[in-house]
Amino acid sequence: MLKAQADRSIVADIDGYSDPLGKFGAAAAARAQELRAGLPLPSSPSAEDGEAERDVARLIRQLARRGLLEYCLRRGEDANDLVVIEPQTADYWPQAPKLTDTTTVALSRFAYLRRRGSEMVLESPRAGALFRICDPEIASLLMALAAPQTIGSIRRRDDYPGPALLALLLDCQMLFAVAPAKRDALRQAEGDDGLVLWDFHDLLFHTRSTEGRQANPLGGLYPHTGQIAPLPAIRPAWAGKTVKLQEPSGTASPLEKLLHERHSVRDFDGERPITLRELSTFLNGVARVRARWSSPLEFDDGPDIEYTSRPYPGAGSAYELELYLAITNCDGLAPGFYHYDAAAHALTAIDVQQQQLAAMLQSAEFAMDVPSPPPILITIAARFGRISWKYSAIAYALILKDVGVLTQTLYMMAAGLGLGGCAIGTTNIDLFAKMTGLEFHVEGPVGQFALGRGAEPLVSG
């Protein structure tokens, strides 16, 4: 709900939270209420626009950046909706590229149609928005687009929806343009080599289990409370013969002690930050390259494949995981964003916008439910192609297994050094892509870990 304030400012009231949008003229505030029924999408501002038109355009842009708009496409002013576009990324804005009759397009292999409640939606992990399908004839058109079609041939169909929908689908990468030479190699025709390596289900899982490229509720929301009882912490025993195991005897080994001491630490000591030497020891122990070699492909003629050895086990010795560090408080190291070069045992500074770095740290702060960001935030990123070049169907599952193994290694090393750490359950893949300039499907975050010196517990006396 939009509310106009006495000082001419407008705020968006979302589930009890107020988000200020800025100050606008009285005419814009009045027209803002028409957004419930729908307003025409403004074009780029021009010198001929009046103050009210410019204000409305600015307000709509502010709402769009917050994901508070949806876009209806109709055949005509009085017609029913063909589709309703729901943004999934914060910077989505409808664009309509020009199409010619000779342009050949096909449906993306990542696009899928599904039921959501009583509606049908068209989605893709590559798309910045989903399309709520309102006209059943569109489903028939999508079926035809499973094979490459020229725009000219689509225009001659009885279910032709008009040029705008096709352009919007192409802009959202639901459709892709097919070069004549690649009509028989559609997987290679759609996107770069990094995208070719992805299986459909893996990319979908990656984008729908992280932040940044979806608008679904995410996190510990207890969505089934009152409908399904929570499972017990310990599984009920099987009804069979039980063999009672002996209790351990003697002194626990150093490893056993570390396992027992390991716990998540969310409260860090800001007065005693980790030193650069301690951080160097930590990174050396968890991720440094210990050996490097290459060997030929297991079968057939093919290229030699490079391998490394690191302190933790990795699927197929691919070691696809990289560490990026957001530093806010480390004695001897300037605040900023760094990549850990595991071969050179060095930190390389990456120039990022301070607003983006702050957003990454604030997200971790929110996920940990603490009042301040961690001194060091480690983002675990995957170079996806290192795994998917070899493994079909299980590539992303292997990456997540590797993340679990590395996360336990981070915990154990932190405990061994007398430091504190905490795994974080989600990451923002779109934010990381903007910070690094890497396409989200080439390299992206799959885990995070907060690191610091645990605060001493308060002693009451």
Image (cartoon, rainbow, N blue to C red):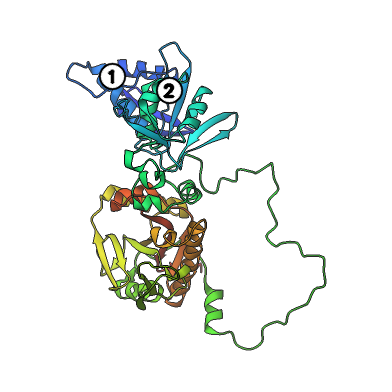
- Number of numbered tags placed on the structure image: 2
Q: Is residue 265 visible?
A: no
Q: Nearer the viewer, residue 188 or 393?
A: 188
Q: To which quarter of the image does residue 163 belong?
A: top left
- Foreground mark, 1 or 2, reads 2
Q: Is residue 419 visible?
A: yes
Ranked by sequence position, the earlier of labels 1 and 2 is: 1
Q: To which quarter of the image does residue 345 belong?
A: bottom left
Q: Is 125 located above or below residue 333 in the figure?
A: above
133 horizontally vs 5: left or right: right
Q: Nearer the viewer, residue 21 or 231?
A: 231
217 horizontally vs 77: left or right: right
Q: Nearer the viewer, residue 21 or 230?
A: 230
Residue topped by disc 1: 25
Question: Which amino acid type is shown beneath numbered disc 2?
Answer: Cys
Q: Position of residue 252 (x, y in %)?
A: 59, 84
Q: Position of residue 154 (x, y in %)?
A: 41, 24
Question: Which amino acid type is shown beneath numbered disc 1?
Answer: Gly
Alpha carbon of mark 1 to alpha carbon of mark 2: how far? Answer: 26 Å
Q: Position of residue 15 (x, y in %)?
A: 49, 33
Give the residue furthest to the bottom.
250
Describe the element under mark 1 as helix, strand or loop: loop
Q: Residue at x 45, y 71 (%)?
A: 298
Q: Residue at x 48, y 59 (%)?
A: 395
Figure quadrant of the N terminus = top left
Q: Is 323 located above or below residue 278 in the figure?
A: above
CB under 8 Å between discs 1 and 2: no
Q: Position of residue 378 (x, y in %)?
A: 38, 62
Disc sitting over residue 72 in the figure: 2
Q: To which quarter of the image does residue 86 belong?
A: top left
